[in-house]
Amino acid sequence: MEAGLALAIVGTIDLCFKYGKKLVETCVAFKGAETEINERILCVESYWKRTRMQLEFVKRVWEGLDEEHQRIQMQILEVLNSKLSLIISKFEKLSTKGEIKRLNYIRTKKHLDESIEDLASWQTMFDPSWYLILKVSSPFVDQELSRNGSEVSSFTSAERLRDALKEQSLQSVSIFLPKDGLDAARIREISFTSAKCMQRAGSDKWFVIDRIQCDTAVDIGSLTRDVRDLARKLKCVDSLTFGILQCHGVVRIVEPGSKRPSSFDFVFQIPRGLSYEPRSLRSYLSSNVNLTLTIRFELAKQMAKSIAYVHTLGFVHKNVCPETVLGFHNSESESDLFFLVGFESIRMADGQTLRLGDSTWAKNLYRHPHRQGLHPEDTYIMQHDIYSLGVCLLEVGLWKSFLLYEAGTIAPLPSPALGIASDGPEFEQPALMKERLIALAKRHLPKQMGERYKKVVVNCLTCLDDDNADFGDQSEFEDLDGVLVGVKYIEKILLKLDEILV
């Protein structure tokens, strides 16, 4: 680690503390003005408390982080300092000699709302790189989490998640649920996705059920371990932070007369305040409802963030597409919240793959050319998920579905948005389909979503090209923890999306 970088982080975090303390003190001076003002001040204080705890943790484990990880942390913290400085200057203009101008009530409320929004957006930007620290194999991380009086060990269940990420977890609680819990349950289909809504008998609470089929070619012992490990990790997630539903448990489905499970049903909790009637992203794209640019950008960021957290959890998803993204209406706001599901093909990021595939064109559309067909060429890695994300972000940017479902047809047809014939060579030559998607992004996205969004999508679609400056050199990502590719993803995909202002 460079000495200059070590000194810089101390100064940067200390400056964050200075600004954060001043922000809270400035806000406290406004207390007692109006109830609405007081509620907003409490929200600012809550955001800063969380941020302060995370920064204290970063400061103590800094020596255990890779230089690239340190650099991205510095970059994000400098953004925080800029935001805090601007927020404080706005509030200082509202007070004279320490006394609040009561006539500035409307402006005060407006500035508080802007402060809350700024802190929330920065937190969303910072969290992926912070949670990635829990993946680092460093004694500094374990020492800090187990340190007596450590505030961070009690917030966001960081210590439990850290333990779940270890190969030999100390957690002994079984994640498997009794099968009879689903026997009399009410099941409701969700359009264009295999996930379903489930309500147990005698309960008014709804869950999401997501099934993983047990292929006959799969080693059932290995799959059971992967299912158990993923469920254990998903029990620790904060759904609203991760963009992934929290796992309630798994039901092992065994057919009568057989000892081998035919499937595993993941049972996911629906976050409080969200509707019990989710829609798949495919349903949104196939409808005539045109979401605003603001909502579409937020959706893109949520999807990209979910991919980052799947990697942090030590898995690759292998099935990222509009069918595996569920949107829930949020009763507290105008927009919907989206979560990644569809873990039917999950695999540990450092595990082995059978390299078995299929020739379904609708699935191949979201797969990198080297991961298509019955016998894919490459072992699955995070960059393959990044490619799939790129196809999804292209559809979101165009706000058109690439799949067309017509009445009376079993399989979807290519939609006019793809601009190719149903018997075109793109379906036989995956590289041509990839070129087609890149061409669509370059031609249409700058006008509809802007040049920066286009660059992010093209970077995703070309992430495995040898000449891709960000992801092309695989030797850069050969660290034992698998952290470096996550850091690069945060820098080149997540932060680039966060830079886009609508």
Image (cartoon, rainbow, N blue to C red):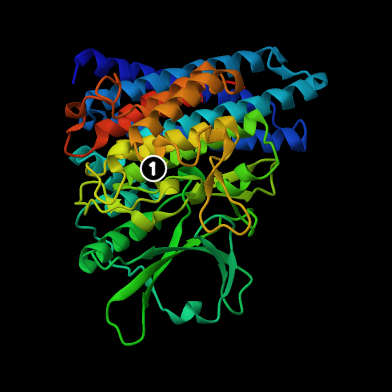
Residue 320 relative to residue 409: left or right: left
Question: 442 or 151, which lies in front?
Answer: 442
Q: Position of residue 5 (x, y in %)?
A: 26, 16
- Which residue lies at the image location 34% right of the left edge and 59% below the top edge? 232
Q: Amino acid at mark 1?
A: Tyr
Does the image show residue 137?
yes
User: From what the image shows, is residue 72 above or below residue 54?
Assistant: above
Q: Residue furthest right?
A: 103
- Which residue lies at the image location 76% right of the left edge and 38% below the top edge? 35
Quarter of the figure with residue 3: top left
- Which residue lies at the image location 48% right of the left edge and 78% below the top edge? 181
Q: Residue furthest front?
A: 423
Q: Position of residue 257 (x, y in %)?
A: 31, 87
Question: 191 or 47, which lies in front?
Answer: 191
Q: Element at badge 1?
A: helix
Residue 114 relative to residue 364: left or right: right
State the residue position of label 1: 309
Of the 4 image quadrants, the one containing the C terminus is: top right
Q: How many marks?
A: 1
Q: Position of residue 94 (x, y in %)?
A: 71, 15
Q: Residue furthest bottom?
A: 257
Q: Residues within 10 Å of mark 1 (few under 14, many from 20)?
A: many
User: From what the image shows, is residue 223 above or below residue 358?
Assistant: below
Residue 56 relative to residue 226: left or right: right
- Which residue lies at the image location 41% right of the left edge and 22% below the top edge? 77
Q: Position of residue 332 (x, y in %)?
A: 69, 46
Question: 479 or 379, which lies in front?
Answer: 379
Quarter of the figure with residue 202: bottom right
Residue 190 relative to residue 309: left or right: right
Question: 172 or 84, which lies in front?
Answer: 172
Does the image show residue 144?
no
